[in-house]
Amino acid sequence: MIRRFLYSAIVMALGTVPVWAQDQATFLLNNGERHSGTIVYGRGSNNIVDGRFHLSASGNEQTFGLNDVAVISFLDATPTVAERQGLPTDQTGLMVMRNGSLQRGHLHNIVGGAGGDFVQWVNEAGQRNNYPIREVSRLYLNPQSARTVFLDPPSQPANPGTRGRASDPPSGATTPPPGATTPPPGGGRRR
């Protein structure tokens, strides 16, 4: 009886290990939407299946088309100056490592296996290599969209009632001309 209990406990514990080892990511789409969750594998050990990424958020699997994703972020950190400057001006992708190094190329797939989860990246020379996700910070898949929706998103006005510039007063408000003084409380002249 005790052996059976211990055996069951070990099987249950081992069955949950892959859940702990799965990596988290935020997919930033070209339209500005953000989706965060756990990377899952649509078929076998491949995340990209039939031209779509797979992500599990709150227990629901979501898929995104390859051409719909601007950035995949594995680390919630502000992009460095070097990262911003290294972003290609053409359609070449960029992989940013956690040690700060940059590599131009394109994503082949995100794969899982006994050794962990890996980014399969094809460099500019055409060589495909596997990089542990724990060493990757971000993947820029669409540099033009990444600039618009991730690096330099449109700013919102400071006050929704402004007419164009953040320094303009709300509609109907008046401001004194430069150099004017505000009258004392109760109006009238000072004595």
Image (cartoon, rainbow, N blue to C red):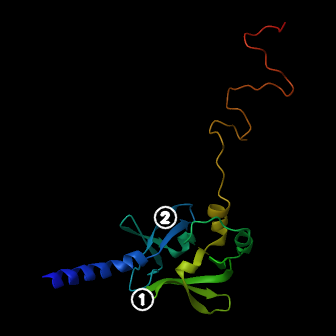
Q: As drawn, is 7 to the left or to the right of 129? A: left
Q: Based on the displayed image, in which of its 4 quarters is residue 21 positioned?
A: bottom left
Residue 164 x %, y %: 71, 41
Visible residue check, residue 78: yes
Seen at 48% across and 65% down, the residue is 36
Visible residue check, residue 140: no
Q: Based on the displayed image, in which of its 4 quarters is residue 81 positioned?
A: bottom right
Residue 56 x %, y %: 40, 70
The quarter of the rendered structure image containing the C terminus is top right
32 is higher (above) or lower (below) than 45 = above
**The furthest residue to the right:** 179
Q: As drawn, is 78 to the left or to the right of 4? A: right
Q: Which residue is mark 1?
A: 114
> Can you tell which of label 2 and label 1 is closer to the viewer?
1
For the residue labelled by badge 1, is the local secondary structure a helix, a strand or a loop?
loop
How many numbered discs sit on the rendered protein?
2
Seen at 55% across and 66% down, the residue is 28
Seen at 54% across and 78% down, the residue is 134
Residue type, mark 1 in image: Ala
Disc 2, disc 1: CB below 8 Å?
no
**The furthest residue to the front:** 2
Residue 58 x %, y %: 38, 64
Label 2 neighbour load within 10 Å: few <14, some 14-19, many 20+: some
The numbered mark at residue 35 is: 2
The quarter of the rendered structure image containing the N terminus is bottom left
Residue 25 x %, y %: 50, 70
111 is higher (above) or lower (below) than 158 = below
Seen at 18% across and 80% down, the residue is 5
